[in-house]
Image: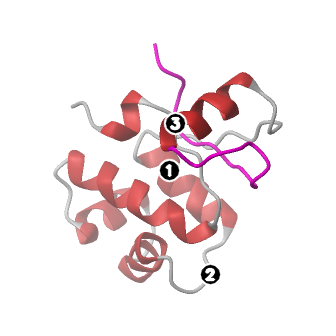
Amino acid sequence: MTDSVTRRPTLLHSAPELGPVVRERRKSQSLRIDDAAGLLGVSVDLMSRLENGQGSVRLDKALAVLDGLGLTLMVLPKEHPWAREAASSNGSGGSDSPSAPTGAPKP
């Protein structure tokens, strides 16, 4: 399946911005939240908190969810070309904002 998450990198500026990316990916795989939680070995509550940007989620759990959904987290210098590409494709402006790109560069 092709969704916007797999087509381009996504530049995040805050933790709650990860939720819609996770939800979009889960839905693109036609998974209900409870089915995804069961497959990924996490609770439905954790999936819900992650997708809604509510409360805190341990990094190891968030990484497990990303991995299980076929996503990855990349940490790059702000001046890296991929970070700049993500910033320009997201319309977020300059590269002086905190960044934690996810996904992969355009093919």
Q: CA distance from mark 1 to mark 2?
A: 16 Å
Kindly identify the residue that appears in the image at 45 percent across and 65 percent down. Answer: 19
Q: In the rendered structure, which amino acid carries the disc numbered 1?
A: Leu
Q: In the rendered structure, which amino acid carries the disc numbered 2?
A: Ser
Residue 97: image location, x then y, percent: 75, 54
Residue 63: image location, x then y, percent: 60, 54
Q: Is residue 47 depicted above or below 77 in this figure?
A: below
Precedes in sequence: disc 2 or disc 3: 2
The nearer-to-camera label among 3 and 1 is 3
Crowd tier of the residue under label 3, counting other residues whose Cα lies within 10 Å: few below 14, some 14–19, many 20 or above:
many
Kindly identify the residue that appears in the image at 51 percent across and 60 percent down. Answer: 18
Q: Is residue 1 left or right of residue 46?
A: left
Kindly identify the residue that appears in the image at 77 percent across and 27 percent down. Answer: 80
Crowd tier of the residue under label 1, counting other residues whose Cα lies within 10 Å: few below 14, some 14–19, many 20 or above:
many
Q: Is residue 57 depicted above or below 72 in this figure?
A: below
Residue 15: image location, x then y, percent: 61, 68
Q: Nearer the viewer, residue 104 or 60?
A: 104
Crowd tier of the residue under label 2, counting other residues whose Cα lies within 10 Å: few below 14, some 14–19, many 20 or above:
few
Name the residue that disc number 1 marks: 66
Q: Secondary structure at mark 2?
A: loop
Name the residue that disc number 2 marks: 56
**Magenta stretch: dominant secondary structure:** loop
Name the residue that disc number 3 marks: 103
The boundaries of the magenta stretch are 91-107
